[in-house]
Image (cartoon, grey):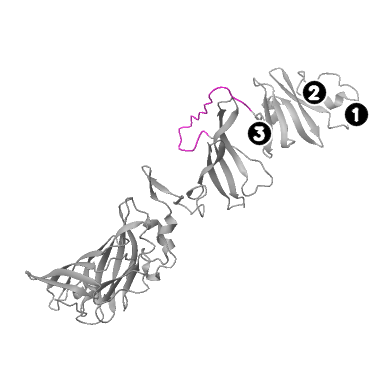
Amino acid sequence: MATPPFNILESKPADTDIVSQFPADERSNRDIIESAIGVEHGIGAFGAEQGGRHRFGVGSNAARDAITTWEVGSLWLNTVTSPAKLQRVVSINPDVWEDVAAQPSSTSFTTDITVTDTDPGAARGPEVFLYRNSASPAANDIMGGFVFQGEDSAGNTEEYASIDAQIVDPTSTSEDARVRVRTGIAGTTATRLNVQAGVYTEGATGGDQGAGTINATALFDDGVQAVADINALTTTDNPASSAFVAGSTGAATNRKFRVGEVGGWVPLEEQTASSSASLNFVLTNYITDFEDFEFIIHALRPATDAVFLWLRTSTDGGASYDAGAFNYAWVGYRSDQGALTGDRSTAAPQIVLTSELDSIGNTADSEAFSGRVMLYNPAAAVHTRITSHGNFSDAAGNPIDVAISGIRLAAADVDAVRFLMSSGNIASGKITMLGRRKVT
């Protein structure tokens, strides 16, 4: 091929036609022929053309914009700026250009880096983008991260910690991801904390439990382990009526309500009567973590008129409840319109929470019994003790206050408690059981 009669980078008049400077038989090689289109600031402009479309050019932006045959991806080197700036077409008709920044595969800095954004608006900024340009993204792919390195005592370069992002689900429009915090312990770097919809520690059973949740294997309060295993406080064989949270069924729903401070009271179960023969609370799943128990009685009303409210205990997990003539002793008083009267039994098949001086009626809610019963350290093989304080009304609507203290006559650990009427069922009302978490 002949050499052009002048250097195409030299300044030429705007109407110079470089194509005409080549021999006629070589003018068809459009991929190497440049056409001059203008001059600005003494710098010649030209564009490399192929197939009727321009692919590359050099010169001023004004010269670039005079060309109307660009394609997406075409390049232009602006030689008017200092330093020269490389640009590319991102869309055409009209042509939209963007600067092409250098993309080093690896860059090292030996000083601090400050990224500043002076935009006064509320939008996020400045921003740093870590773009993993993978054509086949898959679950568990590590997207990128920040690695904190340093030397060890032997001068080796070691990874001490890192923060990275990981794909959970790359499905379009429903992408999921997690952020992992990793630290080096005993020479090994591993994930310690994950942030997904919720937050969970590595190794916690079930992983992410959803928005607003924290899932961990243990909870400490000032260095003291408060909860060794949250799951241990939840059982799958609790009665369906024992769900504590209103409107829920099943213990798993209520697990988050069962984590209390050391020594604090925690709601454990709630049972509602509906023509029930008795309301039974089995303690075997709680006595490891809880020392004392309180039962709050809400308006228990009998189905049969003129009966007493009884309490019995079990030592075999509720398989049977002790009801022998010499199992219990109790003492108490009742107050009726200012009169204080004592009552007791030194050998009985139950502890009578209402005393036997007045009975509960079934004709109105005002006659129902409400009160509190304390059960002290039932796990100890001693003479288990209870105290009770409650009130109800007689048929005339007069309030009756009653306080009872009771004891098991035989030393044994107690692992279940039964509430029942002296005759007939419990028509309505409920009992809530709370536990006081052990201090040590």
Whether residue 51 sits left or right of residue 416 in the image: it is: right
Location of residue 420 (image quadrant): bottom left
Residue 83 in percent (x, y) is at 65, 20
Question: Callout 2: 10 Å neighbours few (<14), some, many (20+)?
Answer: some
Membership of 120 in magenta stretch: yes
Mark yes or no: residue 373 visible: no
> In the image shown, does 217 or 381 lie closer to the viewer?
381
Q: Report the Cα–Cα distance between label 2 and label 3.
A: 26 Å
Tell me the quadrant of the picture where the N terminus can be found: top right
If you read the primary sequence from the N terminus, does the residue marked by circle 2 or circle 3 appear first? Answer: 2
| Residue at (90, 23) in percent of width and height | 2
Q: Report the Cα–Cα distance between label 3 and label 1.
A: 32 Å
| Region of the chain picked out in magenta, as a range | 107-126
Residue 186 in percent (x, y) is at 53, 36
Residue 50 in percent (x, y) is at 81, 34
Q: Mark 2 points at which residue?
A: 16
Q: What element carries label 1?
A: helix
Question: Callout 1: 10 Å neighbours few (<14), some, many (20+)?
Answer: few
Mark yes or no: residue 303 visible: yes
Q: Mark 3 points at which residue?
A: 97
Badge 1 amino acid:
Glu
Classify 192 as above or below 307. Answer: above
Q: Name the residue under label 1.
A: 26
Give the residue furthest to the right: 25
Badge 3 amino acid:
Trp
| Residue at (72, 36) in percent of width and height | 73
